[in-house]
Image (tube, grey):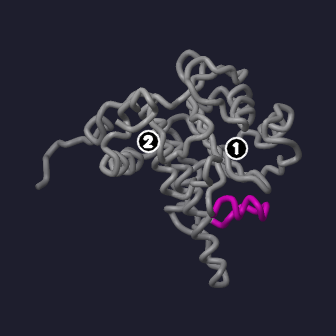
Amino acid sequence: MKVEGFVPTAGALLPELSPRDELVLLARTLWREGYDDHLAGHITYRQVDGTLLCNPWLLLWEELRPDDLLVIDLDGNLLEGHWPVPPGIPLHLELHRQRGNVGVSVHSHPRYGTVWADRGRIPGCYDQSSALGGGELVVVDEYDGPVDSRESAAKAVSAMGSADMALLANHGVLVTAGSIRAVHQRAVALEYRSRRAWQVEALGGGRELPDPARTFFRSSDGEGFLGFFEAMARRELLLDPHCLEPRGADGSRQ
């Protein structure tokens, strides 16, 4: 049935979410998109007071709950939480120090994006689903020191420049945006693009998405289109209706 005058809003598509809820749903949705390299991967979400929410070490993205998350400062000091700070967090800290416009950053080793990072080559963009979320993608050859080295992290972020996404050579990917919705869309599109380019090139190649469509998608940014993140978040709530509830006092699921 068509409802005249209905204008969709985030509130109509999802229940009200706290920043912790948003990060949990982002991590769980990305896990299903291929960001599932065991314990690897970090997400940071800048808060209004300048602190960062981040996922802890030792938990899978698919099992996170809001009370698992940590609050850290830009020096990596633990302000709130009961789990260890991720050892690779210097990459995120340097990113947020150098680029105040980054609201959310995602680093992981997704299945197909990491193949192109290992190759040191940007995958072709062959369709609009590969281009969703916009942004600039670059290759950064930053893997010249330990992942917990501030110096190495600073070099990587500087090499990334103003780009929105990076393939970290011999390492993984780094995706940034101003909001949870926007970074979700970019991260999903990057992994989709990486997989699709692999498939197209396996057939001998194809024509990349032409202008003006490619320029339109590349230059698009902001909040990501309403409904994309919300749909995937609803799926997580259906699969685990308790995912936004606290754990038991002993760490078990309630």
Residue 146, percent across and down?
84, 41
Residue drawn where x is 65% and y is 47% of the image: 40
Question: Type of residue at label 2?
Answer: Leu
**Residue 110 can be seen, yes or no:** yes
Residue drawn where x is 87% and y is 43% of the image: 145
Mark 2 / mark 1, whichever is N-terminal = 2
Q: For this rendering, which residue is in front, 32 or 103? A: 32
Residue 133, percent across and down?
52, 50
Marks 2 and 1, how far apart at CA: 25 Å
Question: Type of residue at label 1?
Answer: Ala
Q: For this rendering, which residue is in front, 116 or 211? A: 116
Q: Secondary structure at mark 1?
A: loop
Q: For this rendering, which residue is in front, 81 or 198? A: 81
**Residue 223 can be seen, yes or no:** no
Residue drawn where x is 37% and y is 48% of the image: 236
Q: In the rendered structure, does residue 188 fall within the stretch colored magenta?
A: no
Label 2 sits on residue: 25
Q: What label does residue 163 carry, if any?
A: 1
Is residue 151 depicted above or below 210 in this figure? above
